[in-house]
Image (cartoon, rainbow, N blue to C red):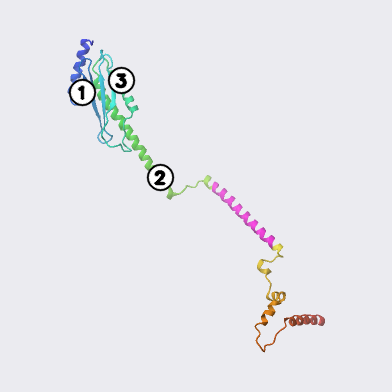
Amino acid sequence: MVDAHYAEEQTNEVEILQSIYPTELEILHSEVPQKFTISIDIEDDDEIRPCNLLLTVEYTETYPDSLPLFEISLTPNTLPPPTDIEAELSDKDLCDLTDRLRELGEECLGMAMVFSMSTGLKEAATQRLVEKTAELIRVKEAKIQKEIEADQAKFIGTQVTRASFLEWKAKFDLETKDHLSRLAGEAGEERARRVVSGGKKDEDKRLTGRQLFEQDRSLAQSDSTFIADGDVAVDASLFVQEDDGLSSDAGSDE
């Protein structure tokens, strides 16, 4: 049984709230202690994604000397999915808002407090969405700026510092040393091949025409097939002997 004093204060407050929220307030239980809901639209021009919160309030037997029972819920909406810069209230946000309303209620103990709680809820929820939206915008702009800087870096190249230059030089010197060592090794192998071959290159070891002629008598015989009738055959051995004779005579004259 609710004391008449509390019942009167609760009834008077409900009547005042109905005049403030003619369409937003809905009575769920008309008998004392009353229970009702207040629909609260959360919007701030075009800065945040609009939403609707439902504040459910149930008076206790000793209200307003004690806090009423209350609950905050997010009303489903038919809006399209949020963009990457549109924030929404999460379950954690609703818990934080509940704590905030409890603090407001405790500050108003002993007097009607539902209107203060509803206006405080609207302000706190709006502020929370503004902060979350600003953070989403900041993150997106930072991402875009990072992509721009990455594209610009492709044309600027890597900045050369003393440390990076010394690192490059050490690597370059090592590669140069390896290359020279490889060339020296190849030159040494070439010299070894020349020693084995008597100091001559492969092209120097090819036989002259006379050497081929002397080593292969079939070459002389094959030429005879081209001698026509009446031509005089030449014996190549005679030239060899004559040369030998000339050489002998030259030696005797001396």
- Is 206 placed left or right of 8 in the picture? right
Contact? badges 3 and 2 (CB < 8 Å): no
- Which amino acid, mark 1? Glu
The tag earlier along the polypeptide, 2 or 1, is 1
Crowding around mark 3 (Cα neighbors within 10 Å: few <14, some 14 to 19, many 20+) is some
Q: Position of residue 52 (x, y in %)?
A: 26, 29
Q: Secondary structure at mark 2?
A: helix
Crowding around mark 1 (Cα neighbors within 10 Å: few <14, some 14 to 19, many 20+) is some
- Which amino acid, mark 3? Arg
The image quarter in which residue 193 lies: bottom right
**Does 25 sit above or below residue 156?**
above
Q: Which of the two marks, 1 or 3, is nearer to us in this view?
A: 1
Crowding around mark 2 (Cα neighbors within 10 Å: few <14, some 14 to 19, many 20+) is few
Q: How far is mark 3 from mark 2, CA to CA? A: 47 Å
Report the residue marked by disc 1. 26
Report the residue marked by disc 3. 102
Report the residue marked by disc 2. 149
**Does 127 sit above or below residue 222?**
above
- Which amino acid, mark 2? Glu
